[in-house]
Image (cartoon, rainbow, N blue to C red):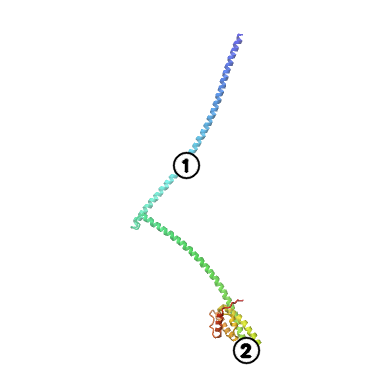
Amino acid sequence: MADIILQEAALRRREKILEIKDLEFQDTILKFSRFLEESAEKRKRSAAKASAERAAEQAALSRREVVLRQVSAAKDAVRALESQLRDFQRYKAFMQAAAEQSHGLLPTPEALMARHELLQATSTSLARECAEAEQALDGARLERAAAAADGRERCERLHLQLLLVQLACDRAERAAHGLLARTDGLAAQERCGAADGESGSAAFDIKARMSDACAPMALVDGRAASALAAASPADQTVALRQLVADLRSVLDGGPPAPASGKGLALKQDARVKGPSTCVIG
């Protein structure tokens, strides 16, 4: 019995020990859980810090590259300025030497610069005037070409008109020769006392041919055929002989032959009445 009691007491002590160990184990688990949570938070903070540090480092590297480029650009600018300074110093020395060698005409570099600017402005003005002169010359060439083309066209038209007048003069001369023969025959019939009907028809034929013969001559000296058509057969014969002489003179390249007597009076009468309009067929 005493053994059982001792065993029960020992069992209760073990149970308490187990409970205490269990509580200790739970406390350990709780502490370990908090440790894990704290470790996770620390890892997060460490990772965030590392990321921030890497970003800062990258930004620092970028700024370093920018600064290096700026420093390099500044060095290049300094070298360029030093080169310009050397050029300016050489140019200053040259200007001073040129001023000294000008024998008082350009006593200072400023006077030399003013003369240079004046010459440059004069050169620019001359170049502009030269360009304007070239434009004017081009315009004159175009006008000359247009005038030459117009002159050639007018010469061609005048040459064509001259050919037409020459052809008309040839026709008029042939008609005039026929009229002379016809008027000579009519004059012979009048002297022999021919019939009035034949004389009238012959006179009408002469007037018709006279109009055909005188129409081309209006292109040469401006006479009107109506003045000759109203004249008598004898006057027409005289005028016709003068017309033949004029046509021959014109065809030979000279002025119309001088008129005399009835022919001159008929020409003056034709000029007073004005030139007639003639169309060459």
Taking depth in this image into account, of 87 and 135 the one nearest to the observer is 135
Q: Determine whether 102 is above or below 81 in the image.
A: below
Q: Earlier in the sequence, mark 2 or mark 1?
A: 1
Residue 32 image point, x, y percent? 55, 24
Query: Judging from the image, what secondary structure is the residue with disc 2 in?
Result: helix
Q: Residue at x 39, y 51 (%)?
A: 88
Q: Position of residue 109 (x, y in %)?
A: 36, 54
Does residue 149 sit above or below 64 in this rendering?
A: below
User: Hey, what amino acid is under mark 1?
Assistant: Val
Q: Position of residue 271 (x, y in %)?
A: 55, 80
Report the side of 278 relative to 127 (left or right): right
Q: Residue beneath label 2, please?
A: 190
Q: Nearer the viewer, residue 272 or 145?
A: 272
Q: Relative to residue 150, is residue 93 depicted above or below?
A: above
Disc 2 to disc 1, C-alpha distance: 131 Å
Numbered circle sitting on residue 16: none
Q: Which amino acid does label 2 sit on?
A: Glu
Q: Tell which residue pokes out farthest to the bottom in this image.
A: 192
Residue, x 49% and y 38% (percent of image)? 59
**Res 1 → quadrant:** top right
Quadrant location of residue 206? bottom right
The residue located at (56%, 24%) in the rendering is: 30
User: Please, what secondary structure does the residue beneath circle 1 have?
Assistant: helix
- Callout 2 crowding tier (Cα within 10 Å): few <14, some 14–19, many ≥20: few
Q: Are marks 2 and 1 in contact (CB under 8 Å)?
A: no
Seen from this angle, which residue lies furthest top?
Answer: 1
Quarter of the figure that contains the C terminus: bottom right
- Label 1: which residue? 66
Q: Nearer the viewer, mark 2 or mark 1?
A: 2
Front residue of this view, candidates 224 and 84: 224
The image shows residue 207, relative to residue 62, as above or below, that is below
Q: Where is residue 224 in the image (x, y as percent from the top left)?
A: 58, 80
